[in-house]
Image: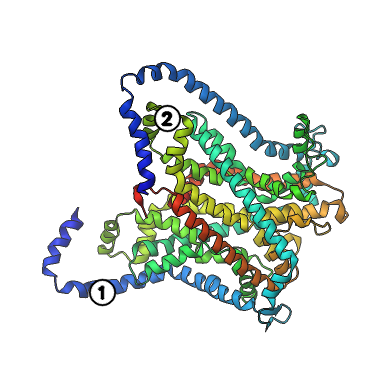
Amino acid sequence: MTTAGTPLARQVSLPAATAPAQEAPAPVAGRKPAIYWAGQAVRWVLLALLALAFLYPFAWLLSASLKPRGEVFDNRLIPETFTPQNYVEVFNQLPLLAWIGNSVLIAVLSATLVTFSSSMIAFGFAYFRFPGRSFLFGLLLASMMLPGAVTLVPNYLIWKYLGFLGTNVPLWGATLFGSAFYIFLMRQFYLSLPRELFEAARIDGCTSFGMFRRIAFPLALPSAIIVFIFEFQASWNNFAAPLIYLNFGTPEQYTVPLGINYAMQQFSPTAGGQGDYQYVMVASLLVTLPMLALFAMGQRHFVEGIASAGLKG
Amino acid sequence: MTGPELSPAQDPGAGQAQPKRRRRFATGEALAGYAFISPWLVGFLLFTVVSMGYSLVLSFTDYDLSTNTAEPVGLKNYQLIVEDPKVLTALGNTFFYAALAVPLEIAVALGLALMLNGVRRGSGFFRTVFYLPKMTPTVATAAVFLLLLNGNTGAINQFLGFFGIEGPQWLVDPAWVKPSIVLMTIWTVAGSMVILLAALQNVPRELYEAASVDGASKVRQFFSITVPLISSTLFFVVIVNTIAALQVFDQAYLLFYRDANSNAPDAALFYGVYLYQAAFQQFNFGLAAAMAWLLFAIIIVITFIQMRVGDRLVYYEGGKQ
């Protein structure tokens, strides 16, 4: 800590004492614009090239979704045979509408439930003082470190005992109990609210739940939105859980990600398919678009949420 | 304003009554607190505490899914792990992948973050572009990369061909299996990038100004100012990415195990995939539980080592522990 700090301080301050202050600004001021803009230009060119590389798979996906069967693999960015009817035909080839319905239902349920449960639990941890509070919160933080594999099989059996196997309940049911990371995130916000706010409400006869519903939650809405869109994305993109819980049902029960995986198997020549990967591409594009729209709407929330998790964590 | 005024006025008079009042107040408050956190408590008890205990018990049994009975078999499952050469292969693959993926992810994320931090204009636009892959469902990413990485017709080898490089058989050649997954993971590196960018933006500009007035080179500034001041964030990103890499499943499954009719190369057998197969294809729940505990132990050991090393390397501002 201090040992690391001292060399830094020395390195910055020592030359400052030796270099005459009058000499430094003149050349810097005269030289800076040219070098500065050259440096900026180099960065822009590099960033632009990297941006093209990052965008290429999206462009490839869009064009592949508009190609007929034989041309999907030809890597042309402009399809030789423009085939927009893929976007209609895909609904005949695959139960895509059912998949989208399942995905929407599960994502909306998960995001809504986890937002309310986590907000409430976080308020409990942030505002009320009770024996064992910091111990329990420590357990909550520790539970984030637990690899999912440890509870994978028992949780499967618990859902089985509860009679929910073969339904989509295991994919959203646990959100009723909040989620450690979101509770942590929301608690950080509640801790920034002044206590007097709640004392005043209490004197006015406000109940504990009223304080949460009327004061805390409305004020925490920006944080709640972060939780909602994070969970919506996590649920929408989730592949492993539907693979475990829905794989044995009929294809109509699948979510879009599991459905796309199923479609790739169906169309694969090794499974007797004809290689109709253009439909896989259409479905892949359609499952991606809502996420890109979500990001366009909530970009600030995503970036803030992730950055704050990193800085506080 | 009124709060601080009121309490001192009450305090002297209620000197004796205070402890009693406090306890009574605390009882109601404590009950309310427990009520608020009760959903988490229930979920935690059921899906973490009970589940972990159950998992531990399962690891010493043979579970029969058709009759829902568990027969104790002692250490058999752990013995199976030690004796099964595939477990060793899977562990080796997973470590190799983590050792390859984590440094590359950090390097790319830091490189992008540094460039974004260095441009005055347009950084918001580029940040958005780099973040889009992170929003994309892994299934869609895998569907595209399966075709991009195709050794014969894929766009990546076609691109390499422009420079006279004959690209490898990414998805078939055992030596290129892990780089394939790394490449796909790096495309979605923006999560780490955003965290590092936030840390970079927290570094006071005056430090760089002072250093450049003093004639410190950019490289010197990077190692003497940037690295120490973002080291705690860098450390966090390393730990999170390592834990994620050791548990890699989605990418490996989607690239190599999606098709039940074709055999994946042994080089693509990751621990997470093998554990999934043991649990939900062979329904050997006891073995899967034992494998999960081994993974947990490995993650704890590796994280502990990283913490110890990190304690020496990380510079905490204001000497926070």
In front: label 2 or label 1: 2
Please state which of residues A281 and B113 is positioned toward the viewer in this rendering: B113
x then y, percent, for residue A122: 42, 61
Q: What element carries label 1?
A: helix
x then y, percent, for residue B16: 14, 74
The type of colouring in the image is rainbow
**Residue under label 2:** B216
* Residue ID at (33%, 33%): A13
**Residue B286 makes an appearance in the image:** no
- Describe residue B173's horizontal placement relative to residue A30 as left or right: right
**Location of residue B48 (image quadrant):** bottom right
Residue at the left extreme, as displayed: B13
Numbered badge on residue B148: none
Please state which of residues B280 and B268 is positioned toward the viewer in this rendering: B268
- Residue type at the position of mark 2: Ala
**Residue under label 1:** B23
Counting the numbered discs, the total is 2
**Location of residue A174 (image quadrant):** bottom right
* Residue ID at (35%, 56%): A191
Q: Between disc 2 and disc 1, whose residue precedes?
A: 1
Q: Mark 2 lies on which chain?
A: B
Asked if marks 2 and 1 fall on the same chain, the answer is yes
- Residue type at the position of mark 1: Arg
- Describe residue A305's horizontal placement relative to residue A266 as left or right: left
* Residue ID at (41%, 47%): B315
The residue carrying pointer 1 sits among few (fewer than 14), some (14 to 19) or many (20 or more) residues within 10 Å by Cα, namely few
* Residue ID at (59%, 55%): B244
Mark 2 in CB contact with mark 1 (< 8 angstroms)? no
Q: Distance between the residues labelled 2 and 1?
A: 61 Å
Please tell me whether residue A114 is drawn above or below residue B130 in the rendered image: below
Please tell me whether residue B24 is drawn above or below residue B313 in the rendered image: below
